[in-house]
Image (cartoon, coloured by chain):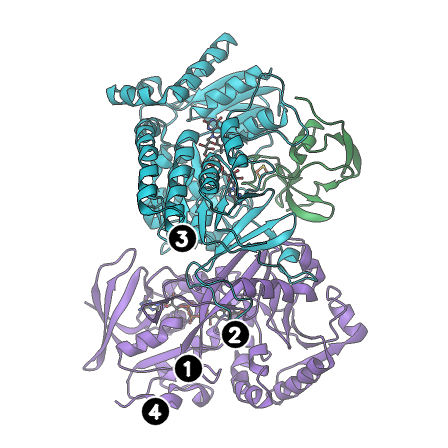
Chain colours: A purple, B green, C cyan
Amino acid sequence: MTSYDTAVIGGGLLGCATAWHLARAGNRVLLVEKDQVNRHASGQNAGSLHFQLEFRMVEHGDDAARAAARALPLHLDAMRAWATVEDELGERCGVSRTGGLMLAETPAEIAVLDRKAALEREYGLDVAVLSGPELRRFAPYLADTVLAAGHVPGEGKANPRLVTPALARAAGRYGAVLRTGCRVTGLHRRGRHWELRTGTGPGDTAGETHLADTVVLAGGVWTAELAAMADVRLPVFPVGLTMSATARSRPFLPHLIQHVGRRLSMKQTEDGNVLIGGGWPAKLVSRAGQVDLETNPELRYESLVGNADAARVVPAVFDLPVIRTWTGMTTLTPDHLPLLGAVPRRPGLFVATGGSAFTLGLTYARLLARMVVTGETDRSIEDYSPSRFGALNFV
Amino acid sequence: MDRPEPVTIEVDGRTVPAHPGESLATALLAAGERAVGTTRGGARRAPYCNMGICFECVVTVDDVPCQRSCLIRVRADMRVRTAVPR
Amino acid sequence: MSAPDVVVVGAGPAGLAAAATLGRHGAAVTVVDEQEQPGGQIYRQPPAGFTPPAGSSPAGRALLAEATAAPGVRWLADTTVWGVLGTRAGLDGYAGDQPPPGRYRVATHGPVGVRLLEPRAVLLTAGAYDLPVPFPGWTLPGVLTAGGVQTFVKAQGLLPGGRFVLAGGHPLLLVVAAQLVRAGARVVEVALIQRRRDLLPGPAGLAAAAGAGGKIAEGVDALRVLRRAGVPVRFGTVVRRAAGDPDLTTVTLAEVGPTGLPVSGTDRDVPCDVLALGYGFVPSVELARQAGCAVTWDSPAGGWVVRHDEWLRTSVPQIAVAGELTGVAGAEQAEVEGRLAALGVLRDLGLLDEHRAVTLARPVRRELRRRRRFVTQVLDRFAPDRAALGSLVTDDTVLCRCEEVRAGDVRRALRANPHLGTANAVKLVTRAGMGLCQGRSCQPGLCQLISTLTGRGPEQVGAFTAQAPVKPVPLRALAVGDEPPAAD
Ligand SMILES: Cc1cc2nc3c(=O)[nH]c(=O)nc-3n(C[C@H](O)[C@H](O)[C@H](O)COP(=O)(O)OP(=O)(O)OC[C@H]3O[C@@H](n4cnc5c(N)ncnc54)[C@H](O)[C@@H]3O)c2cc1C
Ligand SMILES: Cc1cc2nc3c(=O)[nH]c(=O)nc-3n(C[C@H](O)[C@H](O)[C@H](O)COP(=O)(O)OP(=O)(O)OC[C@H]3O[C@@H](n4cnc5c(N)ncnc54)[C@H](O)[C@@H]3O)c2cc1C
Ligand code: FES
């Protein structure tokens, strides 16, 4: 039995980045991943770095938007984190910050865009609403139907294929121990330590027990399941999402594209493929009345059509073939705010998930690591604390 | 093999005779085009499987990219671009 | 148009036999095939308006006639099936049109755009394709699969070059070489990787062969044609390299030692402008895998094959398979399997009662057993030695043709990420398998390399996740245009 300062459960972006920060700070870190690093949401997502409020946050009216805006301080932090991460890692991860546009096609949508921009400016986000010739000059590839767009200069993309493996390697360089094909099956407080039990994963490692002073749950959609191992209930829910990728084409789309009135995220990768997503649902598979988190959600034809249809705001995309679609799962919280911080009444247990945790993952990781090491953070994360769901937990 | 009278198609601006109904890959090869395109890395590529599996034979036909020339059939006056890098 | 009872994907021998059987017993069948003409790979017909030279009456004419004459069979040519949707979580009406309960959506793309078929049962008879074996120079213009060369010659009446070398490890090479000779081509050499002594049949092989006179006669006939034309057929010979600038001009052949590896110092350069490769076949299981059908690794049968029960039903209800998807076994077995699978579907749909289905299936099963005995013998003898073939790859060899990922890239990626070791994980870090062909050309070679480098077996390395669309679909055709894609 080996003992560590911190055990991080989950080898997605969040887990790998947290392990990296912790190991860099001198912690002895164990990272446990049941499958392969980057196998789930972190390797399946759209790679958008969006710092504006998303469509899902504004579609339910101004009050809901105002509530969701409480995460904006994290967005600003994440913008800085992505600006420097490649230098810190010493390698390219496809980070591009050439700006993002949120499109409006009707007067009503323009009104939403204006109110959204005003709200975002309250939090210090640099957003301008472009229209007319200015917009055409900036984004000549847009369809004529686009009337205005909210522009945030620091938005863009990163390559989900590259980021998390790079973080895992960096964590390894600072001495973090990586266990893949190793599933955590039990989590218990023993005296002043946490005891992790691992079962045999589909690949490599047989059952083991590890001790750690602190534990970070970075389990993505498995967060509720992991928390339950420590007898904690967290209201986080899996949702299925759909992505489409076109064949490669010459570079013509330098910006991140979103839409204020419907589900859309679109960008061109460095390799030339156009990725289309933005929240089109995929159907979760259930087995014996339980959501089956091990099976990828089922593609809905309607989502694929929706994906394709939304792309009409950039007509050049319409000529390309779709070569692949995929589905994945991500976590939502009931209030669309992140779940981030120490778990009440479970000394040494930390969690982060929810929200756009690709964009925000580096920030979550930095804040968690700081909490683990120093017991505090450099900014208030009260709004995101698991304690807001304290009513669900009696012991 | 007896085949219908040839028509012409346009390949990268050149006029090329071809038999309507034969595969475009056949017509291109018969016209002496040993390769139908170039990869991004600059390598010449030509039909490999000739049955729609490998996508090595893709060309742009009448402005639609990524058409498998081994499956597409010759029609009079079709416009073929082989030079589009993929 | 009313929804079909059954959609058959693929109009090769398996699909044709199935359609004939289904139609005869009253099922409404839609047969979908990407090709212009039914027939699949072996009974490929020339394009409409082309007349093959007299005397070359196409094989399989009886089967084609039987299938086209069967009542209730509708043909969708030039149409690709790109997904079977609703097999995992079921379909519901929350997000769109209400599909009939208990049906899947077979998503197609063809001359009329994207269409959904909603049958009561699906029969996958998608066949197989040539096993891609990477080695230096295999991407040069002039290097083709043997099947590809055959299609140019047989179905298009074109000789795709002047000097042909055929190399690989499958008896199809002999058949194609003979077809080339008959068509007037200059065949320089046929090189088979198997050593002659390894091919001699044992007693069991001879007994089984008695049940397969046709195939053997075909091989013997081919050898005779080649001998008469003076074409050398060399055993124990492998192609190590293809070279030329800009197109193929030379191949390097070498002798194979007892371990299956080329013997150093035996290299020989042979000038040619076409190299036809035939190492056997890979079952086209991607649609089955996309639909969620369980597969098993069976190397001699072509790699991943679809698991099935005695009625050829897969692990997914209402989806059956026949032909090469159950393991590569040739046209005759594909045809028999097509009939059996059709009887199973008819039984499940209630169009045949249990007793009739079992009775009708009895002679079909007998025939199938007889064929399988022969096929097993052949497969064992011609099974690709994947590790030995994998050793042909150098760091500079392109594995993924579409994305131009080389073996060295994969080696470096695995060294940098020692915690990775599956096909999917390597795809994600290297882009191998992310191109237009969706990994069909690189998956076998890539997985073999991962196995060699990590010591993991084929089951552990796995395959790329199969996703819809299994073949590309124009975005425009998917979007709701003026004319919404209708279910029919
Ligand atoms: C299709 C799609 C598109 C998206 N697009 C975007 C986007 O554009 N921008 C954005 O910001 N966000 C996006 N997201 C969301 C984003 O991908 C996720 O929020 C983020 O990747 C979560 O990272 P994670 O590390 O928390 O989770 P994951 O990447 O899911 O990692 C969690 C890991 O924990 C492991 N694990 C779970 N249980 C155990 C156990 N018991 N033992 C060991 N290991 C365990 C899992 O195997 C998994 O690898 C998208 C998500 C999807 C699905
Ligand atoms: C190129 C090639 C040449 C061959 N030549 C010979 C030979 O000379 N002699 C010999 O004995 N055997 C030959 N074989 C083997 C022989 O073709 C097979 O054993 C036999 O055809 C198998 O029949 P099948 O019905 O299973 O599949 P196939 O005959 O392969 O038929 C499958 C059909 O499905 C269609 N299809 C596949 N996927 C889709 C999709 N997603 N959507 C729509 N349609 C789809 C294909 O277009 C094809 O027409 C050859 C095989 C290949 C691949
Ligand atoms: S040659 Fe392979 S798809 Fe056309």
- The quadrant where ligand 1 appears is bottom left
Task: Identify residue type, mark 1.
Answer: Leu
Residue designated by label 2: A81
Residue designated by label 3: C318
Q: Dot 1, crowdedness within 10 Å: few (<14), some or many (≥20)? A: many
Report the mark closest to the observer, 3 or 2: 3
Q: CA distance from mark 3 to mark 2?
A: 51 Å
Q: Depth check: C294 or A342 in front?
A: C294
Task: Identify residue type, mark 2.
Answer: Ala
Task: Identify residue type, mark 3.
Answer: Gln
Using the image, determine if residue C322 lies above or below residue A184.
Answer: above
Q: CA distance from mark 1 to mark 2?
A: 17 Å
Report the mark closest to the observer, 3 or 1: 3
Q: CA distance from mark 2 to mark 4?
A: 34 Å
Q: CA distance from mark 3 to mark 1?
A: 45 Å
Q: Quadrant of residue A289?
A: bottom left
Q: Earlier in the sequence, mark 1 or mark 2?
A: 2
Q: Position of residue C32 (x, y in %)?
A: 54, 44
Q: Depth check: A190 or C63 in front?
A: C63
Q: CA distance from mark 4 to mark 1?
A: 17 Å
Q: Position of residue A295 (x, y in %)?
A: 38, 62
Q: Which quadrant, please, contains the N terminus of chain C?
A: bottom right
Residue designated by label 1: A340
